[in-house]
Image: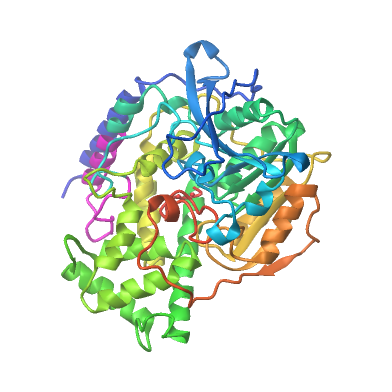
Amino acid sequence: MASRHSVARWLTACAATIALLAVLVPGAQAQNGDAGRPPALAWGDCSAIEGANPRAECATATVPKDYGHRSRGTLDLYVARLPAKRPESRIGSLFVNFGGPGGTAADRIATEPDTTEEGATFAALNERFDIVGVDPRGVGLSRPSIDCRANQETQGVYAQPFERPEILDPRAMVGRDVDYIAQCVRLNRDVLPYVSTANFARDLDGLRAAVGDDKMTYLGFSYGTFLGATYESMFPRNTRAIVLDGALDPDQYVNDPLASLDEQSAGFERAVGRFLQACARDQAACAGFGGDDPWDALERLIEQAYASPIPAGDRPAIDGDDVNAAVVQAVYAKQLWPFLARALAALERGDGSRLRQLVDIFYGDNGDGTYDPITDRYFTIGALEQRYPHDLRTFLREGRRSYQRYDHAWWNHGYVEAAWGFYPVEPRGVFRGPFVNPAGAPPTLVVGTTYDPATPYKEARRLVGQLGNARLLTMRGDGHTAYGGNSPCIDAAVDAYLIDGTLPAEGTSCRQEVPFAQPQPAAPAPLSAVADRQQDGPAIAVAPHVKPDFR
């Protein structure tokens, strides 16, 4: 066994390795500042986006890398909009962010259908608003775009095997994290210091002016609520109507992220329990999974998969980590419960192919040996601005606690967060609060779901308290975010506020109207449709493993 002194020397060496990486990037700067002159927008078609609505228009906005030092160069942001269908009654532009950090928006808006029957989320709002989606700095079709070129299943922050106390090798864990971070910095060093949420908020304020709006109208989901709270705190005189759905506690997210991920892991665990309760009540809806005791059936499947991975056709076999990842992936949206039930029922019969589809979505596996860089972006943007401790022992302690407390989501908190603590890049232009919507500004509408797994309901309540000038709208139900296909009551209240500023009455609570037993597709939608959105609604986080941040 290594001595205490040898371990201490090793930790010091790790710290030195991380410090060497930091010389690749410029130092920190914290300023609020002004967005300055609006970028020019030359609207054209959206040929860069497959399946774009013919009505969609796209443009590139050139913005400063560093608003405090404009001589450092520029970045290009990709912007898409769906023009208002009733231009004679047009109110302005509605900017939408679907979550992250690292999630795209331009493709979501450009491919939005025209009608609710076709699956449109914003059909009613698009009557009177141009709906605008912007790929944030380093994301999607914006350039440069972050890509660490990592095999997410073996190299990324959620690489397997998920750390557990009985298999933990701290040296190997740290070595993997250091290698991944070094690769990310080497490949993306020119953009990483500049991708803070605050800088993107400055970009949005410039784009607000560029589209001709005096005031910002904004709808943000999940991490998009952090972006929205940041924007209105930095630009309180420039807001018209701000809606934050799937709300996280912005102060906790950025200043105490260990606590934020602990709360999220508890939310995931609670959501898994509610799914299993639903299975016990309605075996037909649950495809017969688990019989009289779905809880025991799931635990037996996990133990079996760890002992002897279950075949998944021509794809890699399913192990216990895969089962846990897939279950957490699927409880993000109640619309995915039926597919999860069928996948688990098939797994009981020795067929892991359905569950493998969920695992592939979790990791962003493109099926050709490459991986969607959504997790790279989630990590590098979040780690840039979140205040994590730098002591490895803290992460080891939290990892042990998480493993003791959470049967299926322990891997989302503790050990995994060490990489965030080691991240060496210093941000340019970060904002960490206070998050306040002052009196005199339009009130913010905050939407929370009582059993939201990713951003627990208590965070929505705390956000209302922090902002001060805000109103809480509640959905009684399951899944991450509420607007768009979960509850007509929620949709009507949000639409009314965005269109004419009418707030729902204090204490308004709406019931979710998504049954467990609903028409089930043959397979879950691809990453762009599931990892970034509920199947019949708006975005969840960029990925199920995203914290409030996938947040």
Position of 496 compared to 530: left or right?
A: right
Quadrant of res 509: bottom right
Identify the coloring. rainbow
Q: Is residue 416 left or right of residue 450?
A: left
Pinpoint residue 446: horizontal percent, then vertical percent: 68, 53
Q: Residue at x 44, y 40 (%)?
A: 389
Q: Is residue 99 magenta?
A: no
Q: Is residue 461 left or right of residue 427?
A: right
Q: Is residue 307 above or below residue 506?
A: below
Seen in the picture, residue 27 relative to 50 is either above or below; the reply is: above
Is residue 495 visible in the rendered image? The answer is: yes
Residue 280 in the image: state x and y as whole percent.
44, 84
Q: Is residue 305 above or below residue 182?
A: below
Given residues 15 and 56, the one toward you in this image is 56
Which residues are drawn in magenta?
Answer: 157-181
- The location of residue 269, given as percent across then percent down, is 44, 67
Residue 415 drawn at (x, y percent): 34, 51
Q: Residue at x 54, y 14 (%)?
A: 69
Residue found at the very far top of the displayed protein: 71
Q: Is residue 391 visible?
A: no
What residue is at 67 percent from the left and 65 percent from the top? Answer: 488
